[in-house]
C-alpha cells in the first residue's frame, strides 16, 4: 500500500535507508571498498551526512561523507574518490625505481581523504620510514615517490 505524503514534495524519486543499507561501495578506480552499514543523518539539520562502510571481518570500518559520493545506483554506491586507506599494502618505489618498502599505515589530514604522511615498512630488521605527502609523486598500482631513497633515509634521520 502506498503511503501519503504531507511533506509538500514529490517523493516518487526518493530513496530510503533500506535502498542504501547493504549496498556495495565502489571507489573511483572500481575497487570494492565494503558494504554500507549505516546511513548518517545530522540530528539538528536533518540532512544526509554520509555513510558508514563495513570493510569486512577484522578490518576497521570507514565513514564516507556525502561530498565524496558520486551516485547511488540500484547495484552499488559509487564514489568520486579513491579511498586513500586502500594504499595500505602497496609497494613504494623511489623516483628512479628502487624499492623502498610497503605502505604499513597512513596518517590523514584531519578527517579528510587527504594524506599527511605514509609509513613505510622496510622489513623485520630495518626501521620503518615516514614519507610526507609532498614526497609522493603518483599513487597507482604502487606508490612512486618524487625523491630518491637516500633523501628519504636522510629525512627520517632528522
Image: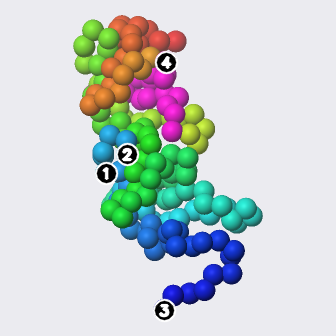
* x, y percent for residue 137: 39, 18
* Tags 2 and 3 touching, CB below 8 Å: no
* x, y percent for residue 57: 33, 61
Res. 71 visible in picture: yes
**Residue at the location (51% across, 87% down)?**
2
Mark 4: which secondary structure? helix
Question: Residue lying farthest bottom?
Answer: 1
* Colouring used for the render: rainbow
Left or right relative to 121: residue 107: right
Disc 2 to disc 1, C-alpha distance: 7 Å
* Tags 4 and 3 touching, CB below 8 Å: no
Give the labeled residue for mark 3.
Answer: 1
Mark 3: which secondary structure? loop
- Pair 1/3: label in front: 3
Mark 1: which secondary structure? strand
* x, y percent for residue 55: 37, 56
Sooner in the amino-acid sequence: mark 1 or mark 4: 1
Disc 1 to disc 4, C-alpha distance: 27 Å
User: Between residues 104 and 109, which one lies in front from this camera angle?
Assistant: 109
- Pair 4/3: label in front: 3
Query: Start and end of the magenta stretch?
Result: 113-134
Sooner in the amino-acid sequence: mark 1 or mark 3: 3
Give the labeled residue for mark 2.
Answer: 27
**Residue at the location (74% across, 64% down)?**
44
Amino acid at each position: 500500500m502506498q503511503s501519503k505524503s504531507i511533506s509538500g514534495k514529490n517523493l516518487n524519486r526518493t530513496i530510503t535507508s533500506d535502498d542504501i543499507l547493504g549496498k556495495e561501495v565502489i571507489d573511483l578506480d572500481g575497487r570494492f571498498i565494503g558494504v554500507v552499514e549505516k546511513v548518517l543523518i545530522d540530528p539538528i539539520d536533518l540532512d544526509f551526512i554520509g555513510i558508514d562502510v563495513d570493510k569486512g571481518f577484522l578490518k576497521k570500518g570507514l565513514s564516507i561523507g556525502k561530498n565524496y559520493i558520486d551516485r547511488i545506483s540500484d547495484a552499488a554506491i559509487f564514489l568520486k574518490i579513491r579511498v586513500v586507506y586502500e594504499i595500505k599494502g602497496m609497494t613504494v618505489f623511489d623516483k628512479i625505481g628502487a624499492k623502498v618498502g610497503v605502505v604499513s599505515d597512513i596518517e590523514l589530514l584531519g578527517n579528510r581523504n587527504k594524506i599527511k604522511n605514509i609509513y613505510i615498512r622496510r622489513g623485520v630488521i630495518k626501521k620503518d620510514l615516514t614519507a610526507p605527502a609532498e614526497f609522493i609523486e603518483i599513487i597507482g598500482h604502487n606508490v612512486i615517490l618524487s625523491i630518491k631513497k637516500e633523501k628519504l633515509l636522510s629525512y627520517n634521520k632528522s
